[in-house]
Image: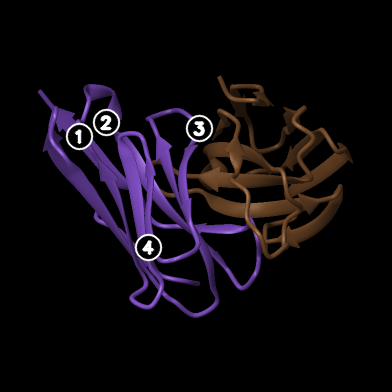
Chain colours: A purple, B brown
Amino acid sequence: GQNIDQPTEMTATEGAIVQINCTYQTSGFNGLFWYQQHAGEAPTFLSYNVLDGLEEKGRFSSFLSRSKGYSYLLLKELQMKDSASYLCAVSYNNAGNMLTFGGGTRLMVKP
Amino acid sequence: DTEVTQTPKHLVMGMTNKKSLKCEQHMGHRAMYWYKQKAKKPPELMFVYSYEKLSINESVPSRFSPECPNSSLLNLHLHALQPEDSALYLCASSQDGAGVTYNSPLHFGNGTRLTVT
């Protein structure tokens, strides 16, 4: 399978900025998605990157470097409700929407 | 609220039972998916239906049998499951058919939490 690596857990303070990194194998890369998943709930789509650069969407931004096989999700002005797992998922080999997920990063936001 | 509806939310079944999980979407999406998610693990792809045809079976045991009666519905029939099959089963859909070169996000249902006793 394709290795997609992200930190297992992170802790940050309410109001702060946190960056969640994701690295992946570049061979056959098609596109990269970030999803948020609260405990016991469905994953929800946050962002999609296919070209190098930064995609900004409100408090959330996602960056991609195709040559380095690297992406990050940036969360600004953290709120308690941002405590969740953040899943990096990659589409390979022109397989469209058939995604391979990383292990997820559990983010805990503290007051 | 998610636009992909899954029933039941919870299911407890014995190893000799036969049960079915159901998934429904009315967004006109062309592809539907079954994922399995164990606790604190990422979702793992099981099956993909694209334009109502099974396009991917990720080496899933035959005790799991998918069915796509029409473009809005996706079922997963369960028979003779094992305790290790206990997991959250997620249904998802996407606007584009699976396997095309352009991407559209997956929309997930809230899942069915399955316990096999």
Q: Are marks 2 and 1 on the same chain?
A: yes
Mark 3 in CB contact with mark 2 (< 8 angstroms): no
Could you tell me which secondary element the residue under label 4 belongs to? Answer: strand
Residue A70, percent from left and from top = 33, 67
Q: CA distance from mark 3 to mark 4?
A: 24 Å
Name the quadrant of the C terminus of chain A. top left
- From the top left corner, tell me how far across and down residue A110 is, in percent: 12, 28
Question: In the picture shown, does residue B21 fall above or below A8?
Answer: above
- Residue at x-position 44% and y-position 49%: B42
Chain letter belonging to callout 2: A
Q: Chain of mark 1?
A: A
Q: Which residue is mark 3?
A: A42
Q: Chain of mark 4?
A: A
Image location of residue A105, percent across then percent down: 29, 47
Secondary structure state at the residue bearing disc 2: loop
Amino acid residing under circle 1: Met
Q: Amino acid at mark 2?
A: Ser
Amino acid carrying label 4: it is Leu
> Viewed as shown, does residue A10 lie left or right of B31?
left
- List the residue tagged with mark 4: A64
Which of the 4 quarters of the picture holds residue A57? top left
3D distance between C-alphas at marks 2 and 1: 5 Å
